[in-house]
Amino acid sequence: MHMRHTKLLNLVNREKRISVAALARELGVSEVTIRKDLTILEQKGLLRREHGYAVMITSDDIANQLSFNYERKHRIALRAAETVHNGETVLIDSGACCTLLAEELATNRRDVTIITNSAFLATFIHKQPNAHVLLLGGEYQNESQVLVGPMVKKCASDFRVDKIFVSADGFTDAGFMSDNLMRAETIHALAEQATQVIVLTESSTFRETGVVVAFPLAEVQTLYTDENIDDRFIQLLHENDIHVYTVPLEDET
């Protein structure tokens, strides 16, 4: 995503509703440019347009998750993307950080195949130049736009990959949590086809719990998060042989 788009999105999420004129002043560009930017961001589902205004999305769906703290999630995704090589096949879960990881791979890697059960992810990156996505079939969950259930597991059974990148809704000493039992069971089944389970999530996840444990600590090899993670969680993760990589909240300039 263009840096101006990131700044624009941050302004919209901070103000909730902001005029095109105000955005143009803040970003030092013309209103025509802002309108073009808003069209692009609206098409991605990251904001909503009203006459002369940009409005923050307030629903609980994946697009809203993606637009909130976008830059932080993008940094996590970029750091994780460094582990993926040209020509590799990877499994990628739904969730904001995972979606941005997929976008990075589809934009700046060659011949990477992404296997996913996220219809939102597949749609989000479909226009990227190197997008090669295998969408697994199953029962469709409307709000999260993912496919779940035994058919997903059956579709994935013929694949074997080195890495699966997964999201998390919460955390306890027992492991990384999910808010949805069906999604947790499905992504856990997909992880059986991978050698490494890699979690991508913001540090705020560690202040939440969840409905069910998706991944016990013993099943996770690596975590990518931001630098706000509490030291006690880092210690717990290290005690369970999980590699922890953090990204800065702001530019280190």
Image: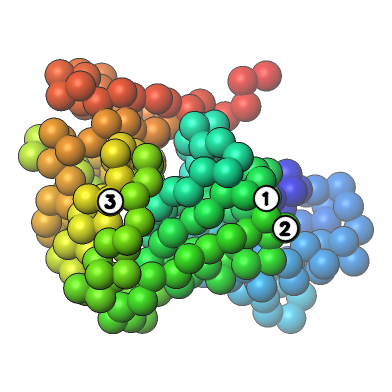
According to the image, label 1 marks what residue? Answer: 107
- The answer to whether mark 2 and mark 1 are in CB contact below 8 A is yes
Q: Nearer the viewer, residue 169 or 31?
A: 169
Q: Are marks 1 and 3 in contact (CB under 8 Å)?
A: no
Residue 166: image location, x then y, percent: 34, 49
Where residue 131 sits: x, y (%)?
Answer: 62, 59
Q: Residues within 10 Å of mark 1 (few under 14, many from 20)?
A: some
Q: Height in image: 149 above or below 133?
A: below
Q: Which of disc 2 and disc 3 is earlier in sequence?
A: 2
User: Label 2 is placed on what type of residue?
Assistant: Pro
Rendered image: mark on residue 129: 2
Q: Secondary structure at mark 2?
A: loop
Residue extending farthest front: 158
The alpha-carbon separation of the residues under discs 3 and 2 comes to 27 Å
**In terms of secondary structure, where does tag 1 sit?**
helix
Q: Which residue is mark 3?
A: 193
Q: Quadrant of residue 238?
A: top left
**Location of residue 82 with respect to 10 vertically, above or below:** above
Q: Quadrant of the C terminus?
A: top right
- Dot 3: element: loop
**Residue placed at 31% from the left, 78% from the top?**
138
